[in-house]
Amino acid sequence: MVKRRLRVAQGSIVAMAALCSASAMAQSTGFSLDRFEPSERGSEWFTADSLDLRGKNRLTLGVVADYAYKPLVFYKNGAEDHALVKDQLFLHVGGSIVLADRWRLALSLPVLAHSTGTGGTVGGVNYAAPSGSSIGDLRLSVDYRLLGEYRSPFTLAAGVSGFAPTGSRDTFAGDGKVRIVPHVLAATELGSFVASAKLGVQYRAQDAAFAGTTQGTEVVAAAAAGFRSKDGKLVAGPELAFSTVVTKGDAIFARRTTPFEVLMGAHYLLADQWRLGAGVGPGLSRGLGSPEVRVVGVVEWAPQPEKKAEPLPPSDRDYDGIFDDSDACIDVPGVVNADPKKHGCPLPLDRDHDGIFDVDDACIDEPGVASSDPAKNGCPLPKDADKDGILDVDDACVNEPGVASSDPKKHGCPLPKDTDGDKILDPDDACVNNPGEPNSDPKKHGCPKVIVTETAIQIMERVEFDTGKATLLKSSEPILIAVLGVLKDNPRITRLSVEGHTDSRADDNFNLGLSRRRAATVVKWLVDHGIDAKRLSSQGFGETKPVESNDTETGRQNNRRVEFHILEEGGKSVDPARSSTTEKKTVTKEKP
């Protein structure tokens, strides 16, 4: 009995130990999740650095707001299972000071203002969602400019950043251990083009795997390129940032160990001391910390260095040996003259060689004739290029002979034409070569309801159906009557194909069937109204032949159409290649 009790006790102890071990293994501690590392205050980029290391003891202070949506998501069978961290809002409070025009010291403290998520179990380990607020890991940096200057064609700097373990691991705001990042920085500016890049190696003492994903030392990089406005105050363009774990060979550029994201942002300098900026962009990988979308903004006090005084202009600007204070023509080399008004001025010139000196010539680059009017002296006589008796200076159509008009915009222009003789002048006629009728729609003004080409019957109005059905609307009868008239008046059209098309919003099979039914409905209407069924056939192509993009309502409306194609004329097949590339498409419209 004693031995039995001992065995029971031993079993209980082992079970309790296993339970304690399982309980200990069932919880996991977080790490520094936020992959957005803001550049030092004073930069014109969010992640890269414009290397503005000017001045002496120049201080810059600012706050960067950084919101990430779903930066930490667990997946199951390729699909999202739950977002351990769904929302994460940091305020990066920081400042920098430039010492001796080359050295810069900087500090940045991330403050986690808001965080939400959904806890869950992955691989038998329970992961608790963060909540509340905390501080992150304090960053201290020092950088030294090696080559170039701010806004020069090439600037190079090197430095190191250190992260103190001040952040909370429970809220995914800190690593709990130090991080050190030696790095190099580069920037360039050529005209309005600006770019920057950063490359470094981040040593992470916190190298424990998280949910089976390797963590540890990483290569980190950022790049930005864009433009600077003419006044130098606005810088805008895309930025890329990524990192990848290099402590294990299979982790390099692996999906979960390589967060990669892009930002489209802009910064603007206000009153030479306040810089405002905003940006937004998606994460491009499923790496830990890469969000579905990130939104950032910055406000910083960044007073600019005092500009150096411009050198005084030379005392002899035109280098003619006559000082500016007595030179009557300080920007044009000249000769000595006893007349103070001509002293230092060149001798009279006649650039166009018309015998009238430039000083008196009103048209110094065009040979002309003398005139008592100073405004015309030395200018050529007025021209009449089109020989219509109206001088070019007053002629609204210089190269076309025309007639006089009280309207300055029509004076000297030919009278408008009416090519198709429908009493609608060509400038207002939407169908210049086809007689039509007036219409309040400028695109249809002067157009007939139907135009017959070599390969098609083009309709200028839409055949309309009920939405998602093949039922003709009453409003379709006028245009169908016009098509009916064409077929009755043109027995030479011995075979006509009625073709239906849809947009891409519904299922492919549904669209194909709908287009076939609609085309068949139109054929039935024509047969019911006296057209021999042997002359007609119908086809449906669904969404396979769009004429415009389905990304807009207008494009989708124009893709829902019925077309009438002539297959045989007088019993002979019609070659579709004869169709003009400028023919208008026939379209249908569903009722909203």
Image (cartoon, helix red, strand yellow):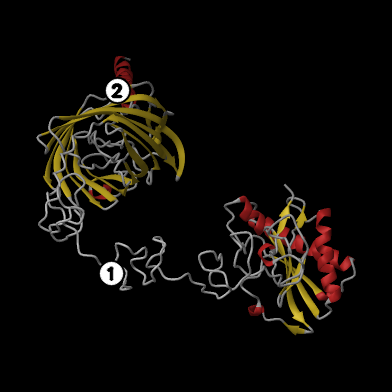
- Residue type for callout 2: Ala
Measured as percent of width and height from the top left, residue 535 is found at 82, 75
Counting from the top left corner in percent of width and height, residue 254 is at: 31, 48
**How many C-alpha atoms fall within 10 Å of the one at disc 2: few (<14), some, or many (≥20)?**
few
Q: Nearer the viewer, residue 590 or 428?
A: 428
Please give left or right for residue 534 compared with residue 98 in the image: right
Residue nearest the viewer, comparing 307 with 583: 307
Residue 415 to residue 93: above or below: below
Place of residue 311 in the rendered image (x, y in percent of width and height, measured from the top left): 13, 44
Q: Which residue is mark 1?
A: 350
Of the two numbered discs 2 and 1 on the same chain, state the one appearing first in sequence.
2
Q: CA distance from mark 2 to mark 1?
A: 109 Å
Q: Is 155 on the left-hand or right-hand side of 234? A: left
Please tell me in which quadrant of the rendered image residue 212 appears. top left
Question: Does 322 appear above or below 146?
Answer: below
Q: Name the foreground residue: 252 vs 550.
A: 550
Tell us which disc is closer to us: 2 or 1.
1
When the figure is inspected, residue 139 is found, relative to residue 571, above or below; the finding is above
Q: Residue at x 29, y 50 (%)?
A: 253
> What numbered label is drawn on residue 17?
2
Residue at the image position 30 percent from the left and 39 percent from the top: 46
In the image as oriented, which residue stretches furthest toward the top?
Answer: 2
Under tag 2, what secondary structure?
A: helix
Quadrant into which the N terminus falls: top left
Q: Are marks 2 and 1 in contact (CB under 8 Å)?
A: no
For label 1, the crowd category at 10 Å Cα-Cα, with few meaning under 14, some 14 to 19 and many 20 or more, is some
| Residue 286 in view of the camera | yes
Residue 305 lies, with reference to residue 565, above or below; the image says above
Q: Is residue 442 left or right of residue 478?
A: left
Circle 1: residue type? Asp
